[in-house]
Image: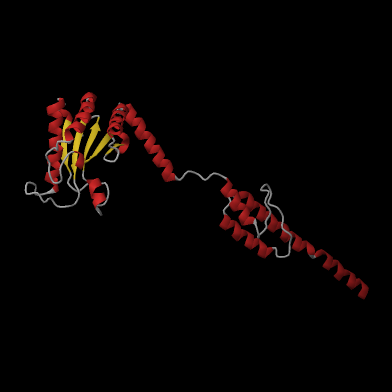
Amino acid sequence: MERKRRREEEHENEERWLLTYADLITLLMVFFIVMYAMSKVDASKMQQLIFTMRTAFKNLPTSPVAGSGMGIQTGNSVAVMQRTQRSSSPPLPLEAAQASQSAKKKAESLHSRGMTSIKEKIEGLVQEKGLGQNVAVTVGAGGNSLVVRLADSLLFESGNASLSPQAAPLLDSVGMILAQTGKYVRVEGHTDDVPVRSGRYETNWQLSTERATNVVMYLIAHYQILPELLSASGYGEYRPLVRNESPETRARNRRVEFVILDQAD
C-alpha cells in the first residue's frame, strides 16, 4: 500500500512541469506578437521591454527576435538600435520641407508673372556697380512681388528727404529697368526709431513718406513712367527688418524699397 502511494506521488511530480512550460509558451507567444506589432524601433521603449523580459526570464537563455536579426541582449541591444537608426538617413524636418516647398512655389510664381528677367537685370546692375552691401533683391511673400531694397544712404543725406547728387546714377539705372516692365511699382520709405532732429519734419512718418514721394516724382520726370503705375508709401520706423539695437541694425532699417507688382494693391 505504501509503495502504491509513493508511485502516485512520483507520477504527480513528473507532470507539474507542464504548467510551467505552458506559462512559458504563453509568455513567449505574447512577446513575439508584441515584437511583430512594433512598426518602429523605439530605443527607450525597447529598453523598458528588455528590462521587463529580463525580470520575467531571469534564468532563461536569450533568443533572437524573429525577422529582426537582433538578439535580446540587454548589454548591447540599445546600442545596436541606435547604430541602425544613425545609419539610415534622417527624414527632412517638416519645417525645412515646408520652407523648401514655399521657396519653390515663389520661384514658379515669379517666373509665371514674368519677373524673373527683371530680377536678373537688377541683380546684374547690383553686381556691376558693386552694391551688394547696400542693395538686396528678394521675392515678396507668396511670390507675388519682387522687392528691391536700397540703403537710404545711397539716395539721401541723414534726416533729409531731398535726393542727394549721388542718387541720380543709381535711380537712372533702376528707372530704365522699371520703365521697360510696365509693372506696378510701390515705393516705400522706412526709417529707424531715432526721432527726427530736423525742424522740417515732425515725425519719421513724414520723412519716410516724403522720401518715397520724391523717388516717385523722379521716375515720372526722367523716365515717363505712367503715374498710375506708381505709388508712394511711408512707414516710418514701424516696419523694421531687424530690431533697432545698434547703429548697424538701425542702418539696415533705414531704406527705400521698390515693390514691383503685377497689379495695384
- Residue at 75% x, 63% y is 20
Q: Horizontal and vertical percent for residue 14?
A: 84, 65
The answer to whether residue 77 is above or below residue 214 is below
Give whichever of 76, 247 is nearer the camera: 247
Residue 223: quadrant of the picture = top left
Image position of 58 (left or right of 236): right
Q: Residue 6, can we see it?
A: yes
Q: How is the image coloured?
A: secondary structure
The residue sitting at 15% across, 38% down in the picture is 212
Can residue 227 be seen here? no
User: Which picture quadrant has residue 155?
Assistant: top left
Classify residue 173 as left or right of residue 109. Answer: left
Nearest the viewer among 201 and 75 is 201
Seen in the picture, residue 36 relative to 264 is either above or below; the reply is below
Q: Quadrant of the N terminus?
A: bottom right
Residue 154 in which image quadrant: top left
Residue 217: x and y, percent? 12, 32
Q: Please state, as top left, top right, bottom left or bottom right, where the C terminus lies in the image.
A: top left
Image coordinates of residue 219 in percent, x first then y, are 15, 30
Task: Name above or below for residue 129 compared with residue 63.
Answer: above
Residue 33 at x, y percent in the picture:
65, 52
Q: Is residue 254 above or below residue 11?
A: above
Q: Is residue 194 left or right of residue 63?
A: left
